[in-house]
Image (cartoon, helix red, strand yellow):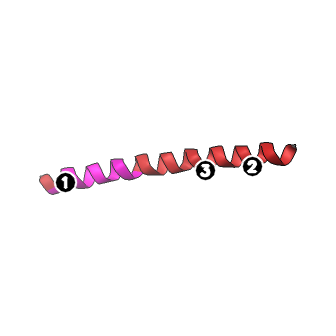
Amino acid sequence: MLCKEHSGHMVINAQKHFHMTFLVSLKRAICIRHIKRR
C-alpha cells in the first residue's frame, strides 16, 4: 500500500518537474526569437 502511494507520488512529481522545465525552455525559445528579430 505504502509502496503504491509512493510510486504514484513520484509520478506526479516527475510530471510537475517535466512541466516546469518545458515552460522554462519554451520561454527561453521565445526570448531567443525576440532577440533575433531585432
Q: Point out residue 37 in the picture as x, y percentages from the top left corner.
A: 86, 44
| 4 within the magenta span | yes
What secondary structure is found at the residue carrying circle 1?
A: helix
Specify the principal SS of the magenta part.
helix
Q: Point out residue 12 in the picture as x, y percentages from the top left corner.
A: 34, 47
Q: Residue at x 27, y 50 (%)?
A: 8
Residue 1 vs residue 28, the one in the foreground: 28
Q: Residue at x 52, y 50 (%)?
A: 21
Q: Which amino acid type corresponds to the residue marked 1 in the rendered image?
A: Lys
Q: CA distance from mark 2 to mark 3?
A: 10 Å
Residue 35 vs residue 20, the one in the foreground: 35
Which of disc 3 and disc 2 is earlier in sequence?
Answer: 3
Q: Point out residue 30 in the picture as x, y percentages from the top left corner.
A: 71, 44
Q: CA distance from mark 1 to mark 2?
A: 42 Å
Seen as rendered, the residue at the extreme left is 1
Q: Which amino acid type corresponds to the residue marked 3 in the rendered image?
A: Ser
Say the numbered circle drawn on residue 25: 3
On screen, residue 7 versus residue 36, left or right, reads left
On screen, residue 27 versus residue 17, left or right, reads right
Residue of label 2: 32
Q: Point out residue 34 in the picture as x, y percentages from the top left corner.
A: 79, 42
Which of disc 1 and disc 3 is earlier in sequence?
Answer: 1
Which stretch is magenta? 3-14
Q: CA distance from mark 3 to mark 1?
A: 32 Å
